[in-house]
Image (tube, grey):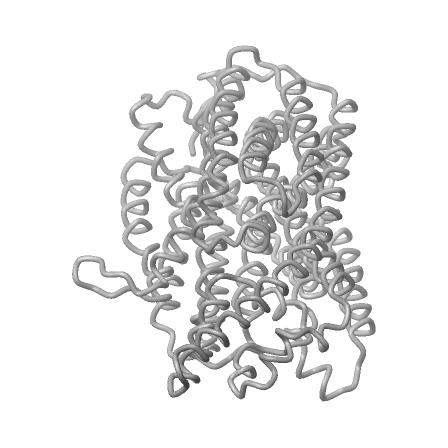
Amino acid sequence: MQHHLSLRSKIIIMLSVMASLFLVALDQMIIATSLGKIVEEFNAFSSLGWVMTAYMITLTVTVPIAGKLSDLFGRRLVILFGVGVFVAGSLLGGMSGNIEQLIVFRAIQGIGGGIITANAFSIIGDLFSARERGKWQGLIGAVFGISSVVGPLLGGFLTDSNNIFGLITNWRWTLYINVPIGIIAFIVIAIFCPSLKRDSKPKVDYAGAALLATALATLILAIDNTEVIFANLIASTGISLLGLRATLFAIVVAAIVGFIIVERRAKEPILPPYFFKNRNFILVIIMASLFGSAFLGSILYLTQLNQQVFGASPTTSGLMLLPMVAGLSIASVGVGQLISKTGKYKLFMAIGFIMATIAVLFLLALTPSSGYQYEAIVIFFLGLGMGVAMPIISLAVQNEFSQEDLGAATSSSQLFRSLGSTIGVAVFGAMLTAGIASGLGNMSGNQYIQTLSKNPASSMMGDLTDPDTLLRLNTPSIKQKIADMASGAITTLPKPVQDQINQQLKAQQDEYALIVVTAFSDSMHKIFIVSACLMGAATILTIALKEKSLKTSNLSTASGV
């Protein structure tokens, strides 16, 4: 521990760590806005899923391994390596000449991101006593909330060819932006973060790391974009999607069994088996998984709701989430102060989950006829609830174990929250697609779809029977592009005729929009119900927690970061 460091040094270290973590949290949201431009430049729609999944696989796999390695080799060395890898992956990704290179460099980015994520929360434990950690956990919670809104805004701005200091931006800038901030963070951490001195040579659990990596990577492949990623394999072998997933899950089970056997014998296990003898640890990681699923289900699909129901642009839809971010930031910082003063966390965690559950249930009243003001009020309170609960998850885990297990324990909670998020996004995405497909039914007879199908350029919009394509047709940018194409095709006709055709197209778009918005809204209500159930389950689990008072600083035990 380094509780004896001056407050100035601690603040400088934490600011640099939070800057690094902000880049990682920002990356998933910022790159999502540029996917359309990436596909357009590389003409590689079939590989699109890998751009996101490659990053998620390596990040998720790296988190628990990096947490244990930081316990063995020290937080400073490991996080410096992580920042360096993340910056290198970002720079090389921005320079990609084809989609294959971009996928590889995104995977490298994910390795760096996983290392940073694992160590950012652990460093708090090294610098501050358990009683003081709440303040900083709250600030990190605010970082995650802010990044969820800044990502789409910044990604849209950089992707849309804006002028910065005489340079025209494009999708590559969403990666380049990580480089200068990452370099500054690297320098500050290298200067101010103390190094670790160990008396004995650490034993690395290579077998455990390999089996855990196999289990996590295969699990993500089995639940996220499986049909897209393995499209060629399915087409060439004739294997069904269900059969493929069954095979992948069998590999996951085998790898987990092997991992458990190896960990029981390892001298320095990646995920020590005795962690699972701790009742509070098991409860908290389950809560982390539930929270991860519900959190992304609320934020990720709310942006789509704003675009579909309220007709907002991607940038505006991000701005519409500002009330949630405000609530999350206020609560994260505020609850951190309260926990530091009281030394208690269980009550605050329960209040946070209850508030978030009630807020999500209120979202069920959000319909196409609702005003945005209603959504803004509800998501503000949703942000408050999430802001209260989010920072406490890592804090509760850290308080259960000694300093030597801090990295492994903290990264475990991050791992299960990340897995929960990945599974949640996949499940909610499938629910949304199925709900929309059911709500829309067969759209081949719709006048608007018939009009588009007669246009040779319709093939550029995608499969007009696919729910994702049908949703994209209702976004403001696509609707305007279709209107512009239609106007350009009738310029030789008399002006009254042009006006009549444009009015007919506008009427068809409005009628189509009503159908899509209704189907989308109904499908979102199902997601909100599941999200509320997940948060409600997390609330129930808090009752079973046996709270331990947060420990205060003991300078005599300080040894080193």
Instruction: Give the image location of residue 156, x and y in percent.
Output: 40, 58
- The answer to which of 14 and 331 lies nearer the viewer is 331
Q: Residue at x 67, y 68 (%)?
A: 467
Which residue appears farthest toward the left when viewing the image? 166
- The answer to which of 561 and 287 lies nearer the viewer is 287
Would residue 226 be found to the left or right of residue 550 on screen? right
Would residue 148 be found to the left or right of residue 222 on screen? left
Quarter of the image with the C terminus is top left
Would residue 199 be found to the left or right of residue 227 on screen? left
Would residue 456 be found to the left or right of residue 258 on screen? left
Instruction: Give the image location of residue 213, x and y in percent.
Output: 63, 59
Which residue appears farthest toward the front when viewing the image? 496
* Tally of numbered tags: 0
Q: Residue at x 46, y 38 (%)?
A: 322
Can you say whether 97 is above or below 344 in the image? below
- The answer to which of 514 and 306 lies nearer the viewer is 514
Kindly tell me whether residue 126 is visible in this rendering.
Answer: yes
Instruction: Give the image location of residue 309, x and y in percent.
Output: 59, 51
Can you say whether 42 is above or below 376 in the image? below
Instruction: Give the image location of residue 137, x and y in percent.
Output: 50, 29
- The answer to which of 311 and 420 lies nearer the viewer is 311
Q: Residue at x 32, y 45 (%)?
A: 185
Q: Quadrant of residue 384?
A: top right
Kindly tell me whether residue 485 is visible in this rendering.
Answer: no
